[in-house]
Amino acid sequence: MARDSAVYTCQSCGGVHAKWAGQCSACGGWNTLVEEVAGTGPPGSLAPSKAKGRVHLAFETLDVETPPPPRIITGVEEFDRVCGGGVVPGSALLIAGDPGVGKSTLLLQVAAQASLRGVACAYISGEEAVEQVRARAQRMGLAAAPMKLAAETALREIVEGLKKDRFELVIIDSIQTMWSDQIEAGPGSVTQVRAAAGELVRLAKKRGVAVVLVGHVTKDGQIAGPRVVEHMVDAVLSFEGERGYPFRILRGVKNRFGATDEIGVFEMSDAGLREVKNPSALFLNEGGSRAAGAAVFAGIEGSRPVLVEFQALVAPSAYGTPRRAVVGWDTGRLAMVLAVLEARCGLGFGDKDVYLNVAGGLRITEPAADLAAAAALVSSALDKPLPQDCVVFGEVSLSGDVRSVGRMEGRMKEAAKLGFGRALAPGGAFDVAPFPVAGVSRLDQAVRRIDEENFK
């Protein structure tokens, strides 16, 4: 007979320990070990089957035409874009984000819009009562949607209920509230989250239903629970938004059926989330003139070109240690650009405070933003504004070289569509630009062009 023994599982990384300790030896977290009961019975036998003529493993070749997977079109175009053109039946998606960012609101809209298109949808909430979900739907004008609602946290009841009815899209809000009576651990623990996610993913694959799981995040912005959940699902989506901004970004972190780093842009309002069809116009300054310290970056997010404004302020430091503050960009990248400007271009920032901000709450990660950030810093330091119709992009190396980046033609076309007529970019942009380009091969050349206001 199987005998149970106590183990201690880290609630941050999922590491298993034989005895309790104040600090997890795997991730270094303090007071994260929780006692759980694990079965220690003998594993099942892996002896070969005695059945004659049975093929246990069939190999195939690569030269077989495979049709693309079918898609469930939900009707929320930005959500469908990030999913790769729609949700694939039988897939499992994990959506994570900060508390209050709008995960439940987004998925309620997705379920309601999909049900209005004839998709059988179920929304199961473990955090709110049915009355609360219904009240939100009425406020958003979605009360007429023929979707099914339920409030339940018991995993056994949820699985049995989903097996009785035939659904095409199921939303679980959230996976941290699910509880299995077969595991002696509290809801939200690593063991419970792993077991609940595994059971729901198996249900999705077996019955061909698309399951969307809502996940919580830790104070560091990481998805709460074991990392194995991210490996189990087919897609991981991150719902981001800065406090004080109405804009929300749905970003694809992992997608087995589409491109990663694809983004969908929404704007939060009293009636829910509104899709933003042209995010470039949303993230740009609407004023008639551009101040010193502002540079428009022509970036690429997934398959979509996006224009966003970098804002920099370089001011004399009032204290002994100058401040470095950045929002929407990598702090280490800013330190590198400042070091290159000092070492290769002769500009001094050692006695100055430096502030850098990406307008609109968007977070930029691609290296092509190096030149835009440098141009904004130089423009503020020299008090020389860039032209109103100028976009900037390019990667800066430690040697001071400005390198070419990918998809320059798409960046240029998006800029031309929004009325921009010139660019400060690597020299290779000449061949694909629909307007004049001030080509530079080194960062000091870009500094001279900004100082001399020469962008021809």
Image (cartoon, helix red, strand yellow):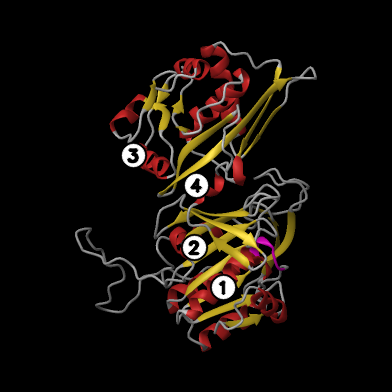
The quadrant of the image that shows the C terminus is top left
The quadrant of the image that shows the N terminus is bottom right
What amino acid type is highlighted by mark number 4? Answer: Ser
Mark 3, secondary structure of its residue: helix
| Residue at (30% x, 65% y) in the render | 68
In the rendered structure, which segment of residues is drawn in magenta? 187-191
What amino acid type is highlighted by mark number 2? Answer: Phe
- Identify whether 126 is placed above or below 414: below
- Identify whether 228 is placed above or below 365: below
Residue where numbered disc 1 is placed: 171
- How dense is the environment of label 4, judged by Cα within 10 Å: few (below 14), some, or many (20 and up)? some
Q: CA distance from mark 1 to mark 4?
A: 31 Å
Say which label, 3 or 4, has the lower sequence index. 4
What amino acid type is highlighted by mark number 1? Answer: Ile
Say which label, 1 or 3, has the lower sequence index. 1
Q: Nearer the viewer, mark 1 or mark 3?
A: 3
Residue 191 visible within the image: yes
What amino acid type is highlighted by mark number 3? Answer: Glu
| Residue at (41% x, 28% y) in the render | 425
| Residue at (39% x, 24% y) in the render | 438
Asked which quadrant contains residue 421, the reply is top left
Residue where numbered disc 2 is placed: 79
Q: Residue furthest bottom?
A: 164
Residue where numbered disc 4 is placed: 280
Q: Nearer the viewer, mark 2 or mark 3?
A: 3
Mark 1, secondary structure of its residue: strand
Q: Is residue 302 left or right of residue 332?
A: left
Say which label, 2 or 4, has the lower sequence index. 2
Q: Residue furthest left?
A: 63
Residue where numbered disc 3 is placed: 409
| Residue 327, horizontal then vertical, whole percent | 64, 38
Mark 2, secondary structure of its residue: helix
